[in-house]
Image (cartoon, rainbow, N blue to C red):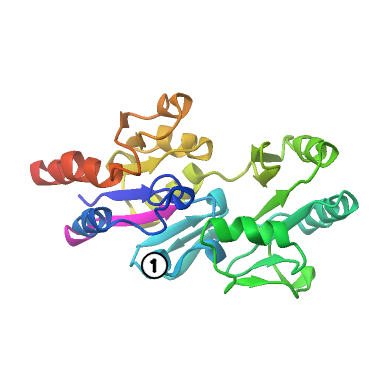
Amino acid sequence: MKKAVFFDIDGTLIDCLNGIKDITPRVKKAIRALQSNGNYVFIATGRPYAFLSDAIRNFGFDGFVFANGAYVQVKEKCIYKNSIKKDHIRNFIHNFEKRNIQYILEGESYSYIKNEYEKLHSLFADYNISKKYLQGDYNLEDVDIYKIEMLCTDKKSMDYCLSLKNEDFNYLYDLNRGYFELYSKSNTKASGILKALNHLNIPIENSYAFGDGKNDIEMLSTVGCGIAMGNADNYVKGFAKKVTDTVQNDGVALEIEKSILADLCIS
């Protein structure tokens, strides 16, 4: 029976802030070994398509769970998408601009950010995000938005962003940088993974996921075997069945080699 393995990007496959801006050769080899045995490999990320590096975009993954599950692609086919309602987007934009909050709207192929948002552009450059799929000139009525990221410059703007969590929306944040990711509660990486598994007719027990962040908790606890990275905090590790080594020490490759490929040989 074929397996499906899902990989977070930041802190799992790469670590841009600490010098790992591409998947390491050992990890690439391990992932390709999974594919050569007839298994599926997916990216499951909070990033939109526009935030992928060319190396990841062209690696040959069998599909993608984007924007924390709001957009799911198998091969070249979109099998699920659930954009944020335009009324919500308009209201967010109005309040962001009133409070001088820089923001980016994340769509299917492109993401949309004002050219004058230099601080937000600089932050994305730190994560090796190209401007190739970023657009500054757009009509909101013509695009679907799946997630929003914001950068605050003072306490009042951060307080506003902290107030956005409700029955419809959740967020991740880094108050030290004033950075927020806002997304719909109706989508998670786990819900996106379940849609991909259903599409491929793969039972949940034949699925694996690697992750390190709080937005990985649902998928780590939902798949057949959730594997936390060694660099994840202890809270996240508590939701995983296994813990591997850090991203710096090729933790993904170590677990694939030690366990997943070994399980395939046994089965």
With 176 as the anchor, is 241 left or right in this view?
A: left
Residue topped by disc 1: 55
The structure residue drawn at horizontal position 66% and vertical position 37%, both measured from the top left corner, is: 176
With 196 as the anchor, is 163 left or right in this view?
A: right
Q: Position of residue 232 (x, y in %)?
A: 43, 33
Q: Position of residue 86 (x, y in %)?
A: 78, 59
Q: Which residues are magenta?
A: 35-44
Q: Residue furthest left?
A: 266
Quadrant location of residue 252?
A: top left
Q: How many marks?
A: 1
Q: Residue furthest right?
A: 98
Q: Secondary structure at mark 1?
A: helix
**Residue 235 seen from this side:** yes
With 70 as the anchor, is 171 left or right in this view?
A: right
Going by the numbered disc 1, the residue's amino acid type is Ala
Quadrant location of residue 208?
A: top left
Question: Does 87 appear in magenta?
Answer: no
Question: Does 40 appear in magenta?
Answer: yes
**Residue 82 seen from this side:** no
The structure residue drawn at horizontal position 20% and vertical position 49%, both measured from the top left corner, is: 1
Q: Position of residue 45 (x, y in %)?
A: 49, 51
Q: Is residue 160 above or below residue 67?
A: above
- What is the crowding at mark 1: few (fewer than 14 residues within 10 Å), some, or many (at least 20)? few
Q: Is residue 264 above or below residue 39?
A: above
The structure residue drawn at horizontal position 71% and vertical position 69%, both measured from the top left corner, is: 143
Q: Is residue 150 above or below residue 230?
A: below
Q: Nearer the viewer, residue 256 or 72?
A: 256
The quadrant of the rendering that contains the C terminus is top left
